[in-house]
Image (cartoon, rainbow, N blue to C red):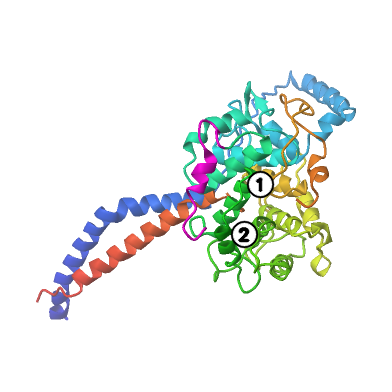
């Protein structure tokens, strides 16, 4: 036994040294990758403190104020109407003109962009939606220089089209030319159904016809079950990307892709409806507001009334979305989860307005109901403008870290294999 143990000591020493060297070389990168991954998978929304300090002496006055406020609200239709998805978004705007993932959190182009689309679908023009004297459109234009990925470019072009402003000079950038530069030789955007679908929709919003090879590439990615997935044909179809592809292929589809193929995509979406009326991202999953919204928009683009979808007697997708509207107007992600309310509410607002992408241009007139700064609003414009009229279902920008994490994982795997090859032949004794 002693001889046996002694023969293994040399290998153990070398192996320990190799592991230590590996940890020094690749540990920091792996730790950063895990931290980023954990950061994306977990969310903790810290709501701002109310700032109200109620003392015993102030309680009667506070109660009186509440009573007076309640009486005032009972006769204020505008105040009651503000408890809608659009009203929630208007109240969530920051002083810099932008939006964060929820009220009082730092603005970012991602959440601001989706908020703009959600408000535009309900008839609010971003150049008239303002806080602190800064409009939402001004914030987005000021952020144009930071738009570096295809999904962000597509979202900005879609916003510009609905706002009746030029996407070729948006914050000093030609976003259309930048987006066209993302097209590959085969017509796709980064070889992904998701980005290619939104590329087609964005160019359409700018009045630009997508190349025939782009639409042909997209149509060719339809899976055998009738749906589309995030990347290319052969993967697992999902509701979000099927809805987006239906929007993109609603006009200009290649000759070989017609009513039968469109019907197969619609059938895939319909088959995913859950008993609660909503739809999941992946087949067999739980319903959520965002996937249901993309399903609604895809159905609208295909000429199908989402109110007519009642698989096995379920409520309609729009009924499901309405069931998620909270008392303050925001839309919950699902029955049991409430996260990124600005993002979720904005995407659901497009479906609730029965608007698909690209959105119809918004009329520039009116003021915000119940205060909140000047806005452009045409009441009920979503349903009136176009009953059959969405980065991306799950935003492309939100997925941008996936490739980086995969590359780091591949690097770590290769390094581990190399270490094993070096150490395996070593024996001392």
The quadrant in which the N terminus is found is: bottom left
Name above or below for residue 65 compared with residue 261. above
Start and end of the magenta stretch? 168-187
Q: Which mark is residue 229?
A: none
Name above or below for residue 66 compared with residue 232. above
Question: Is residue 181 on the magenta stretch?
Answer: yes
Instruction: Determine if residue 394 is in view.
Output: no
Q: Quadrant of residue 83?
A: top right
- Where does the image place residue 239, in percent across and percent down from the top left? 65, 62
* Residue beneath the point at 53% across and 31% down: 171
Please indicate whether residue 236 sits to the left or right of residue 146 in the image. Answer: right
Question: Is residue 23 on the magenta stretch?
Answer: no
As rendered, which of 67 and 296 lies closer to the eye? 296
As rendered, which of 60 and 135 lies closer to the eye? 135
Q: Which mark is residue 344?
A: 1
* In front: label 1 or label 2: 2
- Where does the image place residue 220, in percent across and percent down from the top left? 58, 67
The quadrant in which the C terminus is found is: bottom left
Mark 1: which secondary structure?
helix
The secondary structure that most of the magenta stretch takes on is: loop
The crowding category of the residue bearing disc 1, from other C-alpha atoms within 10 Å (few below 14, some 14 to 19, many at least 20), is many
Name above or below for residue 146 compared with residue 210. above
Mark 2: which secondary structure?
helix
- Where does the image place residue 145, in percent across and percent down from the top left? 48, 34
* Residue beneath the point at 60% across and 37% down: 112
Residue for badge 2: 241
């Amino acid at each position: 036994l002693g001889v046996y143990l002694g023969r293994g000591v040399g290998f153990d020493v070398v192996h320990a040294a190799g592991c230590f060297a590996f940890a020094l070389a690749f540990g920091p990168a792996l730790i950063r990758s895990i931290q980023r991954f954990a950061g994306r998978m977990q969310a903790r929304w810290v709501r701002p403190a109310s700032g109200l300090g109620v003392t015993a002496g102030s309680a009667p006055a506070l109660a009186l104020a509440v009573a007076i406020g309640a009486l005032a609200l009972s006769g204020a239709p505008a105040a009651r109407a503000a408890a809608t998805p659009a009203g929630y978004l208007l109240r969530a705007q920051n002083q810099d003109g932008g939006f964060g993932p929820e009220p009082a959190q730092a603005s970012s182009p991602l959440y601001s962009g989706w908020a703009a689309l959600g408000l535009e679908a309900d008839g609010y023009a971003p150049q008239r939606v303002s806080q602190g004297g800064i409009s939402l459109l001004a914030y987005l234009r000021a952020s144009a220089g930071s738009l570096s990925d295809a999904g962000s470019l597509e979202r900005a072009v879609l916003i510009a089209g609905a706002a009746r402003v030029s996407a070729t000079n948006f914050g000093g950038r030609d976003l259309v030319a930048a987006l066209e530069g993302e097209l590959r030789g085969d017509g796709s955007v980064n070889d992904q159904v998701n980005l290619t679908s939104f590329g087609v929709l964005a160019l359409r919003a700018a009045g630009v016809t997508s190349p025939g090879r782009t639409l042909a590439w997209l149509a060719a990615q339809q899976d055998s079950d009738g749906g589309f997935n995030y990347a290319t044909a052969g993967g697992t179809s999902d509701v979000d990307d099927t809805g987006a592809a239906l929007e993109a292929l609603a006009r200009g589809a290649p000759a070989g892709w017609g009513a039968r193929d469109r019907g197969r995509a619609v059938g895939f979406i319909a088959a995913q409806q859950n008993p609660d009326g909503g739809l999941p991202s992946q087949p067999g999953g739980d319903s959520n507001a965002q996937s249901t919204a993309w399903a609604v928009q895809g159905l609208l683009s295909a000429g199908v009334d989402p109110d007519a979808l009642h698989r096995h007697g379920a409520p309609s997708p729009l009924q499901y979305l309405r069931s998620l509207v909270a008392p303050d107007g925001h839309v919950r992600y699902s029955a049991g989860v409430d996260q990124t309310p600005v993002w979720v509410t904005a995407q659901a607002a497009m479906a609730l307005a029965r608007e698909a992408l690209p959105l119809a241009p918004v009329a520039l007139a009116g003021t915000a109901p119940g205060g909140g700064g000047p806005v452009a609003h045409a009441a009920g414009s979503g349903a009136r403008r176009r009953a059959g009229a969405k980065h991306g279902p799950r935003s492309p920008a939100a997925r941008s870290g996936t490739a980086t994490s995969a590359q780091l994982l591949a690097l770590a795997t290769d390094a581990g294999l190399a270490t094993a090859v070096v150490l395996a032949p070593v024996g001392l004794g």
